[in-house]
Amino acid sequence: MTTKLQAIRGDITSLSVDAIVNAANSSLLGGGGVDGAIHRAAGPELLQECRALRGCDTGDAKITKGYRLPAKHVIHTVGPVWQGGDHNEAGLLASCYRQSLKLAINAGTRTIAFPCISTGVYGFPATPAARIAVETVQASVASDAELEKVIFCCFSEEDLKLYQQILDEPESLGDEE
């Protein structure tokens, strides 16, 4: 089975997938952007479960139930804050995608949706972030095709076009910039 990778523009909180990924802060207690939207849509039970997780390190991920969301699970991952690119931001961002996929597969999910991690208030430039997202997911599903579909859920039309362009490129695994 081949995993389908797709980019869409939409509201990640409305997607009927097995798991959505939350671009969380290290407290896991909600915040702005997609994090706040997911917490609001899931309801107060999500915050209660997140409190028990006692935070999350940058580059790592933790899983909770989806509560009032159409998704069964929320995978919370903490992306890096952009500091110019010389502080392992690329490695930490790639780790967010790998750790999230690992949790999704361990939970038996078949479909997962990612937001654009770290590109909002954390300031990671959109183009390298999208390339890291797509290439990391491609590499992960190439060796473990248990997932049926991975969705990159973009908030803006500009991000959607960027992801679609990268997804349309021939896979160039190993051709790091």
Image (cartoon, grey):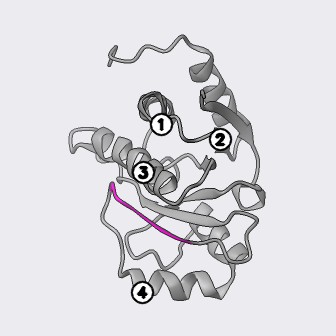
Left or right: residue 58 compared with residue 25? left
Mark 2 touches mark 1? (CB < 8 Å):
no
Q: Amino acid at mark 1?
A: Ala
Residue 21 drawn at (x, y percent): 56, 57
Q: Determine the CA span between mark 3 and mark 2.
A: 16 Å
SS for dot 3: helix
Q: Please report whichever mark, 1 or 3, sits nearer to the chain's N-terminal start.
A: 3
SS for dot 2: strand
The residue indicated by pointer 3 is 102
- Badge 1 local density, few (<14 within 10 Å), some, or many (20+)? many
Between circles 4 and 1, the one closer to the viewer is 4
Q: Determine the CA span between mark 3 and mark 4.
A: 21 Å
Mark 1 touches mark 3? (CB < 8 Å):
no
Is 129 contained in the magenta span? no
- Quarter of the image with the N terminus in it: top right
Q: Please report whichever mark, 3 or 4, sits nearer to the chain's N-terminal start.
A: 4
Q: Which residues are magenta?
A: 59-64
User: What residue is rendered at 70% in x and 55% in y?
Assistant: 12
Q: Please report whichever mark, 2 or 1, sits nearer to the chain's N-terminal start.
A: 1
Q: Amino acid at mark 3?
A: Lys
The residue indicated by pointer 2 is 151
Is 61 contained in the magenta span? yes
Please tell me the numbered disc located at residue 52. Answer: 4
Q: Amino acid at mark 4?
A: Ala
Left or right: residue 172 compared with residue 65? left
Between circles 3 and 4, the one closer to the viewer is 3
